[in-house]
Image: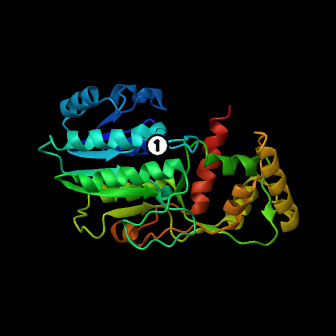
Amino acid sequence: MGEKILLTGASGFIGTNLLEDLISKGYTVRNIDFNEPKRSERRNVWSSIDITQYKPFKKAVLDFAPDYIIHLAARTDLDGKTLEDYSANIIGVDNLLKIADKLSGLKKIIITSSKFVTRNGYLIKNQFDYCPHTKYGESKVETERCVWRNPPKCDWCIIRPTSIWGPWFGVPYRNFFDMVMHRLYFHIGHIKCRKTYGYIGNAVYQIERLLFTETSDEENKVFYIGDEPAYEINEWADEIAHELGFKIPVMPVWLVKGLAVFGDFLGLFHIHFPMQSFRFENMTNDGINDMANTYKVAPETLFTRLEGTRETLKWIKEHSR
């Protein structure tokens, strides 16, 4: 132990959990993020820096001289209208790669992309195959292309988190729990929908295994982060509801489709309605990612979905007081 690990964006959801786990294992860590840590006691390992600003970013990284880097910092919402809105995902990565080249002792760097480099249901041909359907997804395509244009001199890989959930999460992935907890979630007829999600405890394990395992095969540089097998969403919703002591209602497909069309109409007048066609499609179409590469490196599942659900509900209750 005693090795130094730099995390960018460790004030975010995944980073907060990674930071805690690495500290508990005795590593020396540094968090570079322009947002304050979610846990105030971690301010002592935090540097408030905007990664799009090269000079202060360079100074902070070189002063720390890390042995490993996990790059998580990014804008992750879907509200941006242009690629320029996601400059952290492009300029920030480019800056980091230039700085990393100056670190002669760097052993490994992980660059975080996203499952949104392709749309749900798209059959990926290879690690260079992209099919984004949002500006955020396009920005993460540019993240990956930045890495391929200027690959680090040390060992490296790209990770694509799926829908990661658990303690310290926020929107959009917390929305599912909030809707079920407030009894706003319903099953759409008997439609079954399977998606790749990942509990944060398992995600942390996978990322750390990738960090400390050589990934030198140029044909296998991209790894999804998530649980295997994919979740059947109705089953998971029922599992959450059961823990809370109630059952999920079922609504007819025709009614939900009608509400989606009505929501689309209101959207023309910039009126938000909770059900629209985009959401209906998302709730009824599969979104499964190939976890085979990741499970070769990180073969264990440390937490079952039920264990993660119980821990998450406990965390939500404790932080709602």
Q: Is residue 271 depicted above or below 208 in this figure? A: above
Q: Can residue 294 be seen here?
A: yes
Q: How is the image coloured?
A: rainbow
Q: Is residue 272 depicted above or below 239 in this figure? A: above
From the viewer's perspective, tell me whether residue 252 is left or right of residue 297. Answer: right
Observer-nearest residue: 229 or 318? 229
Across and down, in percent, residue 203 comes to 45, 56
At 19% from the left and 29% from the top, the residue drawn is 63
Across and down, in percent, residue 186 comes to 80, 58
From the viewer's perspective, tell me whether residue 152 is left or right of residue 239. Answer: left
Instruction: Count the numbered circles shown.
Output: 1
At 68% from the left and 31% from the top, the residue drawn is 321
Across and down, in percent, residue 242 comes to 75, 59
Q: Quadrant of residue 125?
A: bottom left
From the viewer's perspective, tell me whether residue 289 is left or right of residue 212. Answer: right
Local SS, label 1: helix
Q: Quadrant of residue 236?
A: bottom right
What amino acid is found at the position of numbered circle 1 in the picture?
A: Leu
Across and down, in percent, residue 153 comes to 16, 52
Observer-nearest residue: 141 or 160? 141
Q: Can residue 113 be seen here?
A: no
Q: How crowded is mark 1: few (under 14 residues within 10 Å), some or many (20 or more)?
A: some
At 55% from the left and 62% from the top, the residue drawn is 119
Query: Which residue is under mark 1?
Result: 83
Observer-nearest residue: 178 or 79? 79
Q: Quadrant of residue 287?
A: bottom right
From the viewer's perspective, tell me whether residue 152 is left or right of residue 275. Answer: left
